[in-house]
Amino acid sequence: MPVDAGSMHYVIGPVVTVVVLVLLVLFARWAFGGGGDGGLGRGGGAAAAGNDGLLTRVATLSRRESALALRAVLSDAGIRSTVRFPGAHRAEVLVFPEDAARARALAASFGG
């Protein structure tokens, strides 16, 4: 004999959907959130002071144009680099560790 759930079967679908969505949102906040609760996004998108990840800082300049010009010089020398702007009037040029010595030598001779 079939069990009659009455009108409850109309409520079960939406309730399950809401519970699954809430769990997905909580997981996404944990995995990608910027809080210090152990998720993948622990840094909140910004690098912590002194932590350049896989890159090494080779120069800190006060002008954006100078940093971009140094990056072009490094690129011409076959060195992959990037520029980070951690604050107003501050630009940092970063390279991979294996290129750091050559990049520092070029940065020292850079007149920008």
Image: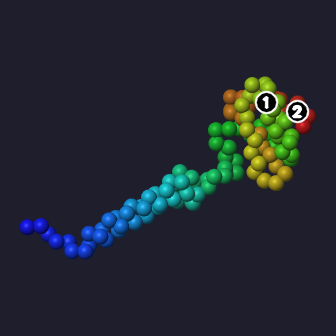
**Residue that appears at 62% across and 55% down:** 44
The quarter of the picture where the N terminus appears is: bottom left
**Which residue is farthest left?**
1
Q: On the image, which quarter does residue 9 sit in?
A: bottom left
Q: What residue is shown with label 2? A: 110
Residue type, numbered disc 2: Phe
- Disc 2 on helix, strand or loop? loop
CA–CA distance in space, label 1 to label 2 = 10 Å
Q: On the image, which quarter does residue 92 sit in?
A: top right
Compared to residue 51, the image places residue 82 above or below, namely above
The tag earlier along the polypeptide, 1 or 2, is 1
Q: Position of residue 17 (x, y in %)?
A: 37, 63
Viewer-proximal residue among 104 and 80? 80
Report how many numbered discs are placed on residues in the image. 2
Q: How is the image coloured?
A: rainbow
Residue type, numbered disc 1: Leu
The quarter of the picture where the C terminus appears is: top right
